[in-house]
Structures are given as C-alpha cells and as structure tokens.
Image (tube, rainbow, N blue to C red):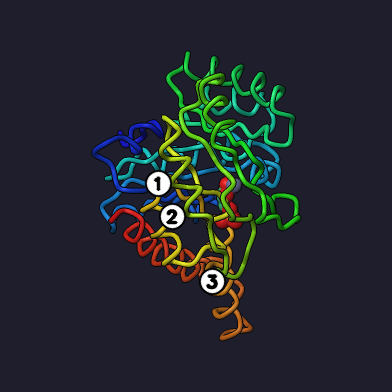
Amino acid sequence: MSLVRLTEVLGGSGPRAVGAFNVIMIEHAEALVAAAERAGQPVVLQISENAVKYHGALEPIARATLAAGEAAAVPVVVHLDHATRTDLTEEAIALGFGSVMFDASKLGYDENVAATAAVVAKAHAAGVDVEAELGEVGGKDGVHAPGARTDPDEAAAFVEATGVDALAVAVGSSHAMTERTASLDLELITRLRDRLPVPLVLHGSSGVPDDELVRAVEAGMRKINIGTHLNVVFTRAVRERLGADPDLVDPRKYLTPAREAVADEVTRLITLLAR
Ligand code: G3H
Ligand code: ZN
C-alpha cells in the first residue's frame, strides 16, 4: 500500500521538494510511477478538473491512477488539482485521494477564505490534506500573467483562517508555457517560506528552466507542479514515431515511446528536485 497524504511526503524526512505531475490518461500514471520508482523518490499524481472535463467523469481515471499508485514501490500521493467545484473535492475524498487542491483564487479574499475553510473541514474529517491558492497564478484560462504576486501577510492570515496544509503562491510563473523561459521572484519565495507555517507550492513550473527550479527549491518551494512540459515531451515522441512510419495505426506503437519519453524526463526532474 503506497498511497499517502501530501503532508507525509512534504514532512521532514521526505525529499527536498516533491514533483507533482498531471495525469491525463492512464499512460501518464504508468510513466510517473515508473519514474518515481527509478528515482527512488515519492511522487504526486494529480488529476485536474480540466482532465475530469475531458473524460466526462472523475471516477474512471481516478480509479486507474489510484491503482497505479497503490502498486508502486515508492510513496504516491493521488491529488485533485485546481478543483473549483466542491462536489468534485468531495468525490475525490470519497475515492481515497491523499489531498485535494481547492482553487478559489478567482474569488475575492473573504469568499476564498469561507469556501476554502468549508472544504478543509470536510477533507480533514476524512484524513485528507488540502492545498489552496492565493494570488492567482495566471495562464489557466490562456491569459499569461507572470506579474501576479502573493502578499506574505495576507497569505499568513489566509493559512490561519482556513487551516490549509499547503499553499500555491504567485511568484512569477504562469500556467501552460511551452518554452522554459520564466524567471521567479526568489526573494519573495524566501519571505513566504519564512512567514508561512505550511509548504509552498509552485504552479506553472513547465515554464521554469532547470536552474531556476533548483533556485526556487533552495528558496523554499516544496511541491513543484508540472503539466504542460509533459505534453511537450509526450507529443514530440508521438509525432516522431508517426512521422517515421506513416502507415502505423496501432496506438500502442506510438504511445509506448511517448510513455517512455515522459518516464525518462520525469525521472530526471524528480532527481533534480529531490537533491
Ligand atoms: O496545477 C498544475 C500545474 O500548475 C501545471 O502547470 O502545465 O504550466 O506546468 P503547467
Ligand atoms: Zn496549477
């Protein structure tokens, strides 16, 4: 049984920072577990509300991901990513997720606090951790907004008022970048780390180059969310395979190299973040 809560892998004896990677299809869950086992490190497998929209339901992809995590030789957190619907957080809790992210970052501060605190109460009663977001990280809806910043005093008050276990903060990254060119506000990360009693989460990490990711971890980031970069790696491998053999029709023939390319890149990233 390898399924654990988020706070268990972010605790004292865990890696310096844990990689949290998005699962769209079962091939991602397989690749991520293989990579974590090769690296000998824990991993977070996260299913976003957008992935749920793609499938039309949470349960099938969730059960496949939970089964992959359960069979793993390393600790695995199955996490709900960017949920704006409270019913989805409740379904994830009932399915056995280790944590849920409730994203009310589009709401005003008071509404965000009230909605997040209600999710925390239900999750904690079931032994599930909660991540929330304050200071919206841009790019979720196609609007690139690397200028957003989280205020440390407001963040401290938010954590106190809601009881969340981890906090996503805006420090210069933006979602859905396909080029790794972002630079982060490292000084703000250090101030947030010193001010907050919970682990910090970096969203939109696909746009952040390796050396800047390492600096962000040194400054205090503990959970590093990467989604789009895996799409770049996966799709490049599919394109290469199909380009090399235009007559190929069996999906297993092009999904195998794509799954392997993701596993290789995630092994490299998990190792980079853990040291
Ligand atoms: O919550 C998921 C992450 O923030 C992924 O963002 O696709 O830009 O790496 P990304
Ligand atoms: Zn995100």
| Residue at image point 60% right, 36% down | 133
| Amino acid beneath label 3 | Tyr
Placement of 97 over or under 34, stated as above or below: above
For the N terminus, the quadrant is top left
Viewer-nearest of discs 2 and 3? 2
Q: Secondary structure at mark 2?
A: helix
Placement of 83 over or under 137, stated as above or below: above
Distance from label 2 to label 3 (Cα)?
35 Å
| Residue at image point 32% right, 44% down | 72
Q: Position of residue 44 (x, y in %)?
A: 43, 44
Q: Secondary structure at mark 3?
A: helix
Q: Are marks 1 and 2 in contact (CB under 8 Å)?
A: yes
Viewer-nearest of discs 1 and 3? 1
Distance from label 1 to label 2 (Cα)?
6 Å
- Towards the viewer: 63 or 104: 104
Residue with the mark numbered 2: 216
Residue with the mark numbered 3: 254
| Amino acid beneath label 1 | Gly
Q: Secondary structure at mark 1?
A: loop
Residue with the mark numbered 1: 220
Ligand 1 within 8 A of label 3's CB? Answer: no
Q: Is residue 24 visible?
A: no
Position of 52 with respect to 253 (left or right) is right
Ligand 1 within 8 A of label 1's CB? Answer: no
